[in-house]
Image (spheres, rainbow, N blue to C red):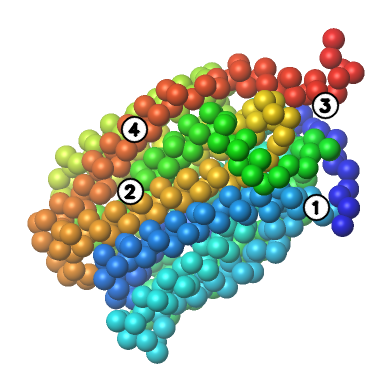
Amino acid sequence: MPSAPPPPPVSRLPLHERTGYALGDFGLNLYWASISAFLLIFYTDVMALPAAAVGTMILLTKVGDAIADPLMGMFADRTRTRWGRFRPWLLWGALPMAATGVLAFTVPAALDPGHRLPWAYVTFSLMMLAYTVVSIPYSALSGVITADGQQRTVLVSLRFIAAFAGTTFVNYATLDLVGTLGQGDAAAGWQRTMMLYGAIAVGLFVFVFFSVRERVAPPQAQRTPWRQDVADLLQNRPWLVLFVLALVIMVTIVMRGGAGVYYFKYYLGRPDLTGWFLGSYSVALAVGAAATPLLSRFIDRRRLLMALMTIVGVLSCAMYFVPADNVVAAFALNILVGLALGPKSPLAFAMYADTADYTEWRTGRRATALTFAAATFSQKLGGALASAAIAWVLAAMGYVANQSQSDASQQGIVWLMTIIPGLVALLAAWTMRFYPLDDARVAEIQQALAARKNPETTP
């Protein structure tokens, strides 16, 4: 099907388009937040799977899914429809993602606990594959809706405000929904909760499809082999730095999120406050994301990200010294970590779009979806390592589901919540020293690209 000519570029995106795009990440985070915060405890405490086996399963399935990300990116870059390259995938993938999400959080009653692990492997793999089909084109959209760097930062900031709103909703409401919808049956509650989340997500992605437009296209004559796209990416130094950064930061995020449920249930002994704890953290993330456009106006994005990850590392390590009876201090430090960590995602995703510009400026070729897909590969790999590490540490420390934990098990939970992600955050701050694109350099590259496409406008 022939592609329609792209709409003319706009300097400031209309409100309905910015809002429409942002709401898509609310839908994605109905799944991402459920996986990050609750998948481990669902497998260990509801499906009754051994913690070590769960850790290995999550690592293997997420690594397999992460490999699919670059493939999906290359498929999306080569999609040609009258609706664009990326928008149609939101419609094609929404229903499969909803269906597989229900299956992944279903306890097969016909199988005893000793035979449920294969079910977990298959259903979780299918859910993550369906998630990839939607999330990769959705992320790539932020690189083609506008070519303006500041507008991208605004767009991505709004996206992550909605993302953190979705995370807040999931973190605060999920356990209550499971209890209400399950009426005392946790397995039924989880299944029905994911049915509700699936219905909401499908509606949101239909809305995104009709709200946004694709304006930035590759050079018209571009016919690039897949291997050339990969080679271009591997020679893109700014992207390589962000690849490592995404992996490292995701270890911090997923480890703190996944360990938080165990931290409140088994260390602080206040499982009734888990929703408030995770929810307040998500609100802080959203506030941090909302502040990103303002912060980036006055501070170079590279330096800003470096400073913020240093703060996250220091505060996370400080949380180790909070005693089990000081819930207020745990809340306060966690909220401060969220405020500092909130701008990370808007900054990083805006910078991914900059690296796509960098490839086009350097080579004359552009592969927007692959750029974002390979970055998502890194994030998923980091998330897989974090989730697996949580499960393996719990198993090594003698964790027993739904029982009082030993001193060693409690200490492991505290380390997973504080020191380990704190040190990883400091590593992320150090990694940013190698990122070569400051804001001035990005502006030069974008001006050069604009001059290539519209030579009659150059002096």
- Residue to which mark 3 is pinned: 453
Rounded to the nearest angstrom, the CA distance separating label 2 from label 4 is: 16 Å
Return the mark for residue 256: 2
Q: Amino acid at mark 3?
A: Lys
**Mark 4 = which residue?**
427
Alpha carbons under labels 4 and 1: distance apart: 41 Å
Amino acid type assigned to the residue bearing label 2 in the image: Arg
Question: x and y percent of residue 101 in the render?
Answer: 52, 69
Circle number at residue 246: none
Name the residue nearer the viewer: 246 or 274.
Answer: 246
Q: Nearer the viewer, mark 2 or mark 1?
A: 1
Q: Badge 4: few (under 14), some or many (20 or more) residues near its Cα, within 10 Å? A: some
Q: Using the rendered view, name the quadrant where residue 97 is placed.
A: bottom right
Q: Residue at x 32, y 86 (%)?
A: 112
Q: How many marks?
A: 4
Q: Which quadrant holds residue 45?
A: bottom left
Residue depicted at 38% across the width and 33% down the height: 428
| Neighbours of disc 2 within 10 Å: few (<14), some (14-19), many (20+) | many
Q: What label does residue 80 carry, if any?
A: 1
Q: Position of residue 445 (x, y in %)?
A: 68, 21
- Give the Cα separation between the discs numbered 2 and 1: 40 Å
Q: Is residue 283 left or right of residue 13?
A: left
Element type at mark 2: helix
Residue farthest toward the left in the current orientation of the protein: 407
Identify which residue, 68 or 249, lies in the foreground.
68
Q: Secondary structure at mark 4?
A: helix
Q: Tag 3, which secondary structure?
A: helix
Q: Nearer the viewer, residue 221 or 279?
A: 221
Please identify the quarter of the rendering in which residue 263 is found.
bottom left
Q: Earlier in the sequence, mark 2 or mark 1?
A: 1
Q: Residue at x 66, y 50 (%)?
A: 74
Question: Vertical placement of 446 versus 321: above or below?
Answer: above
